Image: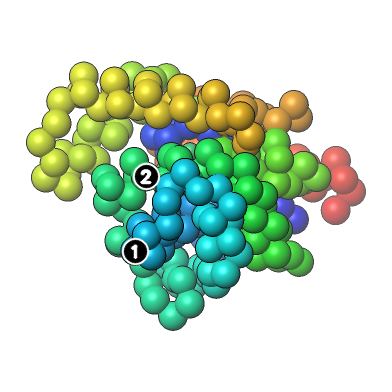
Amino acid sequence: MIITLDGPAGAGKSSTARALACRLGWFYMDTGAMYRAVTLVALERDVALDDGPGLAALAESLAIAFRDGRVFVGDRDISSEIRTEQITAATRSVADAPPVRDAMKRMQRTIAGGLDVVTEGRDQGSVVFPHAELKVFLTASPEERARRRHREEEARGVDTSLHAVLAAQNRRDEGDRIRAVGAMKPADDAVLVETDGLTEEQVVDRLVHLIEERRTSRGA
Ligand code: C5P
């Protein structure tokens, strides 16, 4: 069974997807990490960030894998390196390139093949897994998302203001929305889950409930 979890940055997708996969004992696929992995290697190998075909060829050549909650390229654990501000910023152009999106779509389908998966990203329900049994679009108000991100940054020792976090987030949202291919939007048949005021556990409970409903309606 495939569950897709899409939505904007800061809606709590990653932690929710991870916790849900853990509770179900399913595989968790973090597709943002895959775009970040391609970006990291592109920067290391001097592949221009506007060279769509070059980036796609690079993406095709990489063995991206998830093991024990970590992300690997081949045998190299890149989980921390892909979380820097530099990679976050550069990943935007890489994720905009249609040939890269195409390569990632194929890779994501291969990785998920035959597994019970919780997959998380922007286009998982709308493009990559149109036949997923349950599609969720997780969101929260911009202010709530910015407050969460601000708290996380403070905890990491980053000196920033809530105002700056909100402004940067609005720019990222806009970039995700207007992307020509793979734009962030709920699939037509996605369930919208608004997480304002809910704890992670409450959100996971709600998703588990939705899964049970789907299984019952499919006679599983
Ligand atoms: O979710 P995360 O911040 O790790 O995503 C990194 C980048 O990859 C973002 O720019 C996001 O827009 C992009 N992305 C994407 N499609 C996905 C997942 C992430 O374009 N399925």
Q: Mark 1 is on which residue type? A: Glu
The part of the image, by quadrant, that contains residue 199 is: top left
Which residue is painted at 67% across and 49% down in the image? 102
Within 10 Å of disc 1 (Cα), the crowding (few <14, some 14-19, many 20+) is: few
Q: How is the image coloured?
A: rainbow
Mark with earlier residue (1, 2): 1
Left or right of 113: which side holds 62? Answer: left
Q: Is residue 207 above or below residue 57?
A: above
The alpha-carbon separation of the residues under discs 1 and 2 comes to 12 Å
SS at circle 1: helix
SS at circle 2: helix
Label number found at residue 201: none
- Residue 109 visible in the picture: yes
Which residue is painted at 50% across and 48% down in the image? 51
Residue 108's x, y, as percent? 64, 57
Residue 162's x, y, as percent? 20, 23
Disc 2 Cβ-to-ligand 1 distance below 8 Å: no
